[in-house]
Image (tube, grey):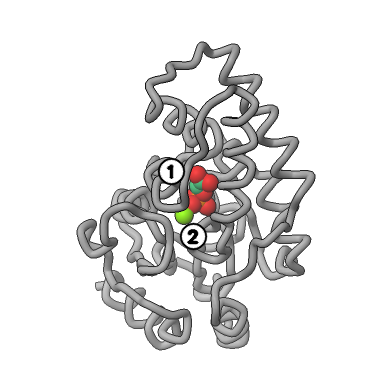
Amino acid sequence: MSSMTKPIVVFDLDGTLVDTAPDLLDSLNHCLAHAGMAKVDPVALRRFVGHGARVMIERAFEAQKNLLSPEQLDWLVGLFLEHYSANMPGRSQLFLGAHEAMHRLTAAGYTLAVCTNKFEALSVKLLTELGQADRFAAICGGDTFSFRKPDPRHLIETIGRAGGDPDRAVMVGDSRTDIDTAKAAGIPVVAVDFGYTDQPVQTFDPSRVISHFDELTPDMVQDLIMATAI
Ligand SMILES: O=C(O)COP(=O)(O)O
Ligand SMILES: [Mg+2]
């Protein structure tokens, strides 16, 4: 571990940094309407997100007993991407206090990065349109590598691209996927309880749970890194 390497905080995107659900829902419903299927409501969406657009669409169709062929799924993913990308940033906004929390961490000497199962191009575009992309030393999506969360390599390689050290890193996420990923990587994980999960995040035993970004302080992050450094 080099003393020159800055400690790093890696954020999940959908449901953690940015409240994207209204736009994901609009674009998913656009696909369902095209296929003559019923719309999904915001509560049901929570069961479908977390593993990228392809899995979201597949699960939404499965829930209506519609099993898609790979060709149909390809077509629907294309339809989704076109609609979602064209309407971006839509109603998506940073969660309350996220801006200030990132600013505090950067001022305290932390590197920031994003590790998301969203497509990389969509993630970069969304963060750019929200004026946030420049804060991050790396933005790695579900298609950046040949593996993605919950594979711990997605997190480890994101840290690598950002010039960080996995021994001085903390993950922040909203789902079981994020918590499992961080645990498998041996990295402490702060769970937000306002994101997209159909079970309470406490169920998955994260290192900490926060209900507002005001709670994510440099002191908390440092304590978590110190606790794993022994
Ligand atoms: O959009 C998804 O399904 C997952 O995205 P996330 O990894 O940023 O939560
Ligand atoms: Mg998420």
Q: CA distance from mark 1 to mark 2?
A: 15 Å
Q: Position of residue 188 (x, y in %)?
A: 33, 65
Which callout, 1 or 2, points to the residue nearer the camera?
Answer: 2
Q: Is residue 35 above or below residue 178?
A: above
Residue identified by numbered label 2: 15
In which quadrant of the rendered image does the N terminus lie?
bottom left
Q: Can you see residue 4?
A: no
In which quadrant of the rendered image does the C terminus lie?
bottom left
Question: Quadrant of the rendered structure where residue 21 is?
Answer: bottom right
- Of pointers 1 and 2, the one earlier in the residue sequence: 2
**Which residue is painted at 42% across and 56% down in the image?**
196
- Residue type at mark 2? Gly
Q: Secondary structure at mark 2?
A: loop
**Which residue is painted at 38% across and 21% down in the image?**
65
Foreground of the two, 124 or 48? 48
**Which residue is painted at 35% across and 61% down in the image?**
187
Foreground of the two, 147 or 79? 79
| Ligand 1 closer than 8 Å to label 1 CB | yes
Q: Position of residue 62 (x, y in %)?
A: 40, 25
**Which residue is painted at 59% across and 12% down in the image?**
71
Residue identified by numbered label 1: 149
Indicate left or right for 145 with 50 as reference: right
Indicate left or right for 146 with 1 as reference: right
| Ligand 2 closer than 8 Å to label 2 CB | yes
Foreground of the two, 153 or 18? 18
Dot 1, crowdedness within 10 Å: few (<14), some or many (≥20)?
many
- Residue type at mark 1? Lys
Question: Quadrant of the rendered structure where residue 27 is?
Answer: top right
Q: Is residue 111 above or below residue 20?
A: below
Q: Secondary structure at mark 1?
A: loop
